[in-house]
Image (tube, rainbow, N blue to C red):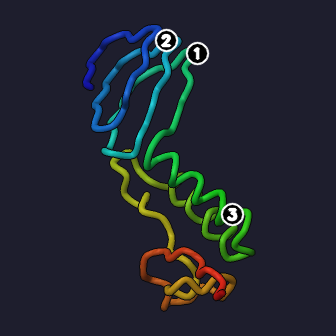
Amino acid sequence: MQGKGQTFENQDILLDNGRFEDCVFRNCRLIYGGAGLVHMAGCSFDGVRWEFAGAAENTLRFMAALYQGAGEGGRQLIEDTFESVRKADAAGAGAAGPTMPGGAGGLGEPAGPEAAGPASPPEAPSA
């Protein structure tokens, strides 16, 4: 969906792959599913409800599980991720987020120069 200078009212809006500039969202349900990037600039929001669905919802649940169940390494990864989001510019530079300490899923290990790979989920205990 796209909009420029439009007012959206009392609608469900799927944000994936959307581009919205100078739009007003009033009493809308804004849904992001994680299937594509969203561009928003100069928009205002009044009485909106934000929802995450599909891949986006799964990502948030995974982040919550890391924060709550992966010890200090998991908590620090999530805190660092939010800090990266705070510092990202509007184009998303810097929003990729930090990596897990140890580079290979080494939860709880101190971060060092070797921590440059993608974040890995914690290993499941052996049965």
The residue tagged with tag 2: helix, strand or loop? strand
How many C-alpha atoms fall within 10 Å of the one at disc 1: few (<14), some, or many (≥20)?
A: few
Q: Which mark is residue 67?
A: 3
Residue in front for this viewpoint, 113 or 76: 76
The residue tagged with tag 3: helix, strand or loop? helix
Q: CA distance from mark 3 to mark 1?
A: 30 Å
How many C-alpha atoms fall within 10 Å of the one at disc 3: few (<14), some, or many (≥20)?
A: some
Residue at the (48%, 91%) spot, across then down: 114
- Describe residue 17's horizontal placement relative to residue 34 as left or right: left
Q: Position of residue 125 (x, y in %)?
A: 66, 84
Q: CA distance from mark 2 to mark 3?
A: 33 Å
What amino acid is labelled 2 in the image? Arg
The quadrant holding residue 35 is top left
Q: CA distance from mark 2 to mark 1?
A: 6 Å
In front of the other: label 2 or label 3?
A: 3
Q: Which residue is mark 1?
A: 47
What amino acid is labelled 1 in the image? Gly
Q: Which quarter of the rendered picture does the N terminus lie within?
A: top left
- Which of disc 3 and disc 2 is earlier in sequence? 2
Residue in front for this viewpoint, 127 or 27: 127
What amino acid is labelled 3 in the image? Tyr
Residue at the (65%, 57%) spot, across then down: 64
Name above or below for residue 112 compared with residue 47.
Answer: below
Q: Which residue is mark 2?
A: 26
Name above or below for residue 101 compared with residue 6.
Answer: below
- Describe residue 107's horizontal placement relative to residue 5 as left or right: right
Residue at the (50%, 86%) spot, across then down: 104
